[in-house]
Image (cartoon, rainbow, N blue to C red):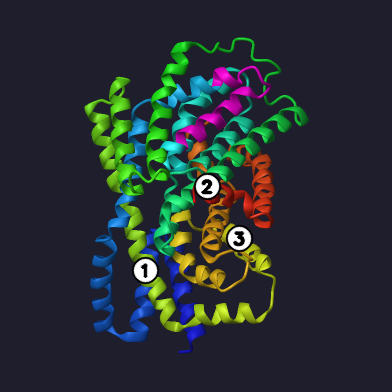
Amino acid sequence: MSPLQLTGLIFGSMLLFMAVRLPIAVSMFCAGAIGYLTQTGWGPFSAFVNAQAFARFASYDLSVIPLFILMGNFATKGGISKSLFSFAACVMGGFRGGLAMASLLACAAFGAISGSSVATAATITGVALPEMERHGYSGRLATGTLAAGGTLGIQLPPSVVLVIYAILTEQNITKLFAAAVVPGIIAMLGYMVAVAIYVRVVPGHAPEVQSDRERLTLATVVGVLPILVIFVLVFGGIYGGFFTPTEGAAVGAASTLLTAIGKGEMTLGRFRESFLGTAASAAMIFFIFVGADLMNAALAMTQVPNQLAAVVGSWGLPPLAVVGAILLFYVLLGAVMDEMSMLLLTIPIFFPMIMLLDFGMPKDMTAIWFGIMVLMTVGFGLIAPPVGLNVYVVNSIAKTVPMAETYRGVMPFLISDVLRTLLFLFFPIVPLWLVGVIG
């Protein structure tokens, strides 16, 4: 069997397993097993699985993932989202479409302590959707805003997606987090501009004036101060070199727990649910790691990824055209896979190809910039039809809003995503500026 046929067998098997509704991790593991066994036999296969599973799970770097997930679960169960939305609603309530903008602010703030897109979308939707419905916002605008706002959970640090990218490419997590700050803020502002334009171009989806908006009080400000302290403590400590990202995640989880206890929201049952949820999410991610490792090892043995890199290099295409094609591929792949699986499957193939190209910047900066570009595109896939995981999450909560309306609601935000991605593609200095500042 030729290398190309083997590659087709591996990918075809994975798609077949996915089509019969096997979990992504199992589909990747089984497809990788078929490819590996075909090329080596049972002995080398069993030795690889045994050694690779231990090597992967024994990695200290991976401990940052469950710690950041735990931090997010404590924030979700601890009632922090209510304080965030109340503060944002007071600040933005005087603007047309203000509650939708407030939801985006709350999503960004909550994402900065959760690192999860789905958790951000689900948590803020539970708080903000009833308020928007009560004030006369259409289901289209409300659910579209919340689905798009959920993506801010991974576009701002501590993004679990960036942590996985850093582990796969052996890059500095601190620099990747720093590089994500400016793009994340631009994403939030772009979404707010999209709301402002939408409510004026398409009237009837938001009230003209929110007459009964709450006034900003000292109690409202005090309610968000602990969240600000957590953010400064964790990321100030990481960027300042006082502790590593893993230690920062542990400090963040402990600080978030103390904040939730102080607010009186953390019961023993919610405490238990936080740990169980963390265990389930981390187990899912680690199992995807094992499946992706096996599949990527089988693909590497075919030498097709290296041949592909050589072929692309021989075409003489401009480096930006290659990156653009890869990003377009991620958009298409996002229709059938979640963001974790996409990264684990494709980064070992695409990253070496990117590092062979000349973008006129140091290789470490190229690696960080490419990570941000991938992050932007993954966020796009979370709300783009025909799947859009965030759309399903928000729509499952807004049971009276048709799915088609939510997809229409995310269209202005997808336009914002495209414009932002093009900005970072042609002007890498924008996401890399803060990296240069912190050294």
Which label lies toward us, 2 or 1? Answer: 2
The residue under label 2 is which amino acid type? Ala
Residue 43 in the image: state x and y as whole percent: 24, 83
Element class at badge 3: helix
Question: How would you classify the magenta stretch by its main secondary structure?
Answer: helix
Checking the image for residue 34, the label placed there is none
Marks 3,1: beta carbons within 8 A: no
Q: Residue at x 45, y 47 (%)?
A: 159
- Separation of marks 3 and 2 at Cα, in angstroms: 17 Å
| Viewer-closest of 355 and 293 | 355
Please tell me the numbered disc located at residue 327.
3
Q: Which residue is mark 2?
A: 180
Q: Is residue 198 above or below residue 371?
A: above
Residue 135, percent across and down?
60, 17
- Measuring 55% from the left and 17% from the top, which residue is drawn there? 90
What residue is shown with label 1? 293
Cβ–Cβ below 8 Å for labels 3 and 2?
no
Upstream in sequence: badge 2 or badge 1: 2
Look at label 1 and name its amino acid.
Answer: Asp
- How crowded pointer 3 is (Cα within 10 Å; few <14, some 14-19, many 20+) is rated as many
Query: Marks 3 and 2: which is nearer the front?
Result: 2
The residue type indicated by label 3 comes to Leu
Q: What span is colored magenta in the figure?
A: 89-111
Observer-nearest of 9 and 373: 373
Q: Which residue is located at x 39 percent, y 79 percent? A: 35
Reply above or below: 318 against 77: below
